[in-house]
Image: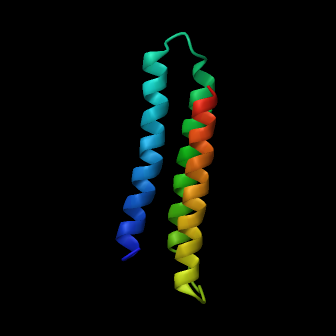
Amino acid sequence: MANIRDLKKNINYVLGEIIEMAVDMEKVNPEMDKSKTAAIIDEAINAFDAFSSRIYEKGVENKYMHYRAIINDLEAKGNELITKLNAL
């Protein structure tokens, strides 16, 4: 990660794409239970808020490790949400 701006863009892109995939699934499958996709969308929004607040934490001793942990957690959360979408 070159800077915080790129990290914020990556968080926005990854979680935004997951939300878009959930909305597209609802459009393609109108008979699908929308509460399941709504739960995934809510989880993605909550994750976005959590990652955004973690970026601006004060008093971090090792910034590199802090941002690296955010990147790893974003990847794990993205994979988890995509797995949930694929299971629908």
Quarter of image, res 32: top right
Query: In which quadrant will I find the N terminus?
Result: bottom left
Query: Does any portion of residue 11 appear in the rendered image?
Result: yes
**Scheme by which the image is coloured:** rainbow
**36 w.r.t. 72: above or below:** above
Q: In this view, does 30 lie to the left or right of 6?
A: right
Query: Does any portion of residue 46 appear in the rendered image?
Result: no
What residue appears at the point 41 percent right and 59 percent down from the top-left corner? 10
**19 w.r.t. 71: above or below:** above
How many numbered markers are drawn?
Answer: 0
Percent position (x, y) of residue 62? Answer: 58, 88
What residue appears at the point 63 percent right and 36 percent down from the top-left corner? 84
Query: In which quadrant will I find the C terminus?
Result: top right
What residue appears at the point 60 percent right and 52 percent down from the top-left corner? 77
Quarter of image, res 54: bottom right
Percent position (x, y) of residue 20? Answer: 42, 35
**52 w.r.t. 83: above or below:** below
Percent position (x, y) of residue 38? Answer: 57, 30
Give the residue at the far top of this rendering: 31
Percent position (x, y) of residue 65? Answer: 58, 81
Front residue of 52/6: it is 6
What residue appears at the point 64 percent right and 29 percent down from the top-left corner? 87
Front residue of 84/44: it is 84
